[in-house]
Image (tube, rainbow, N blue to C red):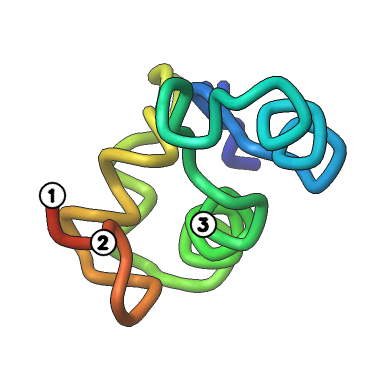
């Protein structure tokens, strides 16, 4: 059996986006969209290479970026 502890980091939900836009803060708190975390979890569950991270805290956003799991994410910096 393999177990992971997944740290999603700051995740921007639809509600957070609406709240930020309503208050004029759309570019102040930028996090990953939920699909980035989902892609990292899917990678952990399906890729044999992921077993090397068993028992560790997995930073989902870092692994998604490192492995280019979501095309176009992260967006280029402004």
Say which element carries label 1: loop
- Residue designated by label 2: 75
Q: Does residue 6 appear in this view?
A: no
Q: Residues within 10 Å of mark 1 (few under 14, many from 20)?
A: few
Task: Indicate which disc, 3 or 2, sits on the residue closer to the N terminus.
Answer: 3
- Residue designated by label 3: 36
Say which element carries label 2: loop
Q: In the rendering, which numbered label is found on residue 77?
A: 1
Residue 71: percent from left, percent from top: 33, 81
State the separation of the CA atoms marked 1 and 2. Answer: 6 Å
Marks 1/2 in contact by CB < 8 Å: the verdict is yes
Residue at the location (80% across, 40% down)?
Answer: 18
Residue 23: percent from left, percent from top: 71, 21
Q: In the rendering, which numbered label is found on residue 55?
A: none
Marks 1/3 in contact by CB < 8 Å: the verdict is no
Q: Nearer the viewer, mark 3 or mark 2?
A: 2
Marks 3/2 in contact by CB < 8 Å: the verdict is no
Answer with the quarter of the image where residue 69 lies.
bottom left
Residue at the location (29% across, 47% down)?
Answer: 63
């Amino acid at each position: 059996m393999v177990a992971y502890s997944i740290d999603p980091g700051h995740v921007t939900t639809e509600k957070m986006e609406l709240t930020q836009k309503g208050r004029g803060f759309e570019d102040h708190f930028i996090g990953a969209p939920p699909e980035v975390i989902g892609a990292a979890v899917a990678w952990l569950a399906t890729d044999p290479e992921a077993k090397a991270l068993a028992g560790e805290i997995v930073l989902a956003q870092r692994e998604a970026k490192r492995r280019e799991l979501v095309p176009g994410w992260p967006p280029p910096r402004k």
